[in-house]
Amino acid sequence: MNRWGKSIGSVLLAGSLMIGGMGLSEGFKGPQTAYADEVQKNIVNVVGKGELSIKPDIAYLSIGVSTTADTAQEAQKGTAGKIAKLTALFKTTWGVADKDIQSTQFNVQPNYTYTEKDGQKVKGYNAQHTLQVSYRDLTKVGQLLDAASTAGANNIGNVRFAIEDPSAFEAQVIDKAMQNADVKAAAIAKAAKRGLGQVVTVIQNDDGNHPVVYAEANMQKASMDSAAGSSVEPGEVKVTTLLNVTYELK
């Protein structure tokens, strides 16, 4: 969480003051106290929101293979062969770098059947291996998915469109959030018949992350016309941040 601000000084004098080991003189009226909450009565706190709508520059594709066989070894071997074929396709035909292909899921599980006579029994095994492929030519996402399906991929999940480096837009989105906070605080001060002073504190409410709202294309809903091929539209994504801003009131 990013914090910056200027504290407002407050003085708190409490307890007994002893001079030279003697009690206070009659002329001294005792400790003077100024409480911080007196200052707190003269502030206003608002939340400013900054948001940018931007065309995405990267797509994260979930592409996997699921294979069923009589034994776990056969199922795993079948899946491994198809994944190797897909990986080679992505690298050689589509120019995807090694760093942009990552395994996100791998498991081999038994398939069970149940009858009253025999009870529960294992009937074959299912092996599943899923890759996340980062792809930057967004005009060809649908074509890549079609090629993956043709090459043996039978488990294609959602496509996530995003900004690969949202920090490049951080200054802009923070500026928008601050402007939004200024407008809100000024309106509150005017309604209260007060003047708006300087900023006291600013807290960015994103826990150090760069929140990005992903646009998702569900492949079950995307156009899968066999003649025209898959059509996946990236649309726009949003980069957002929130600022908790405290102002002085005059």
Image: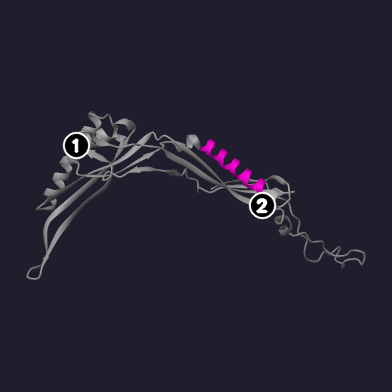
Which of 193 and 62 lies nearest the eye of the viewer? Answer: 193
> The residue under label 1 is which amino acid type?
Ser
Q: Is residue 44 among what the camera can see?
A: yes
Q: Which residues are magenta?
A: 170-187
- 180 is within the stretch colored magenta: yes
- The disc placed on residue 6 is none
| Mark 1 residue crowding within 10 angstroms, few (<14) / some (14–19) / many (20+) | few
| Residue at figure coordinates x 78%, y 60% from the top left | 13
Q: Position of residue 143 (x, y in %)?
A: 25, 33
In the picture of the structure, the residue carrying the numbered disc 1 is: 226
Location of residue 110 by image quarter:
bottom left
Q: Residue furthest left?
A: 117
Q: Position of residue 8 (x, y in %)?
A: 71, 50
Question: Please, what is the dominant secondary structure of the magenta stretch?
Answer: helix
Q: Position of residue 144 (x, y in %)?
A: 25, 34
Local SS, label 1: loop
In the picture of the structure, the residue carrying the numbered disc 2 is: 44
Local SS, label 2: strand
Location of residue 218 by image quarter:
top left
> The residue under label 2 is which amino acid type?
Val
| Mark 2 residue crowding within 10 angstroms, few (<14) / some (14–19) / many (20+) | many
| Residue at figure coordinates x 18%, y 50% from the top left | 127
Residue contact at pointers 2 and 1, CB within 8 angstroms: no
